[in-house]
Amino acid sequence: MKVYFTYVRHGETLFNEIRRMQGMCDSPLTAEGIAQAENTASVLRHEHFDHIFCSSSERAWDTAKILAQYHHAEPVTMKGLKEFDFGDLDGEMIPEKEHIIQPHRISDDWTDVGGDNCETFKVRAEKTFNEILSKCKDQDHVLLVSHGSFLTHFMKTICDGYDQKEFIERKKRQGLPFVPNCSVSKFSFEDGTFTFEQEPMTAEECRAKENKTVTFYFVRHGETVFNIQKRMQGHCDSPLTEKGIRQAEERRETFQNIPFDAAYASTTERTRDTASILLKGKDTPAVYDKRLREVFFGTFEGEHYEPHWNELMRMHMNTDYSSVGGETKKEVQRRLASLLHEMIDTSKDGSNILLVSHGELYMCLMELLFDLNHQDIYNRAGKNNPTPNLGYAVFRYTKGAWKLLKLMSADDKKL
């Protein structure tokens, strides 16, 4: 019998973030940890799993439930998949107890503080895998969601012929984590032997293995009533003006020869109406997605911006409106990254995708993909508006790398 295993470490947790020891104890996933799990879920969406097993620690269970959303199997929790036991050092702050923790790491024996050593771990792991295998048939694919030290000790004590020591030393030299949060590893079982087949890879590294190119055309919506009135317009909305409608009709000519395989628009009416005009005569329907909405400006939504110009410019240059109940750049970029992952993972090689969205969101996207902050974009635009109504940008994804083909401008050259 041969069984294939895909192993995912849980997402980042509170204790990971603040650097507490975390073995049998538990702490919740952070917002970043949830985003990591969603990213890995997306990259694994096309794989088939006959079974999903996870550690009974909530951080692993929550990660498994996110990963399971694209599959029919429900996660089954198992205490035998819990993390390596660090005994009384569990929950301690690592920087404060490094002088005690490090000798235990070197000896890999935590029994003097009530934890595991390699032998106790091996007994537990073998029993757990025997139970898992008893539920499998030949050629089954199994998704496991567990922990970082569990995997490295599995490499060390159970995998046949795998040089775990060399793996650890290599990662140390490279300055890389042994098992990143939500990384994907693969191994198989056959004739009583576990064989390691893929060392831990992040979702981005998994995605880069695919020979796929996707080109994106990002368009800002047409002029609106609030644009004319010089009001802040993020999640709030106002209709397109007659000029805004004409702008969209003129821009449609730019894209007339481009076969869009997919189109996505922000859920605000100004972007939906713009997308409808741009796609007229094409067979591609627009998908409306809240992740493409403009930055939320909090209590400044709908406000005339000129009386608050200096304060708003400070917020704008860093995309941080948290002081008025709005969004931060990190929050905006997290939702953008989620959508980008989904679009890449569901697209075919050579696809063209239309995005209809907003100005400040575009600037956040340029920093996310190309490390261009707001000031960089203003500098490149010179005296021109860096985000004009119906301005468009073009960028491309190829094998894990992003290339900027055109910064946003109102250039109406046909493509």
Image (cartoon, helix red, strand yellow):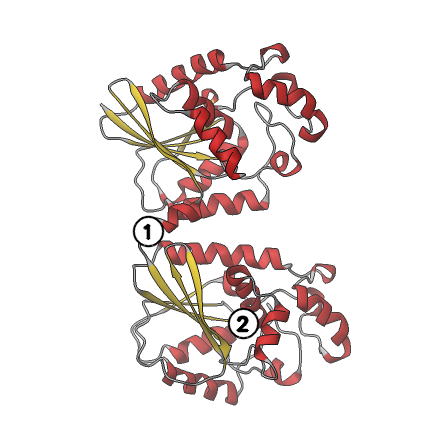
Q: Position of residue 221 (x, y in %)?
A: 50, 77
Left or right, 116 with respect to 254, comes to right
Q: Residue at x 53, y 65 (%)?
A: 366
One can see residue 146 in this view: no
Q: Position of residue 289 (x, y in %)?
A: 47, 62
Q: Residue at x 56, y 61 (%)?
A: 371
> Quick one: SS at disc 2?
loop
One can see residue 305 in this view: yes
Q: Position of residue 133 (x, y in %)?
A: 31, 21
Residue 210 circle label: 1
In the rendered image, the vertical position of residue 58 relative to residue 283, given as above or below? above
Residue 166 circle label: none
> Quick one: SS at disc 1?
loop
Left or right, 305 with respect to 211, comes to right
Task: Depth check: give the residue in front, 29 or 333.
Answer: 333
From mark 2 to mark 1, how far is it between C-alphas? 30 Å
Q: Residue at x 67, y 78 (%)?
A: 231
Locate the N terminus and report the quarter of the image it occupies. Answer: top left
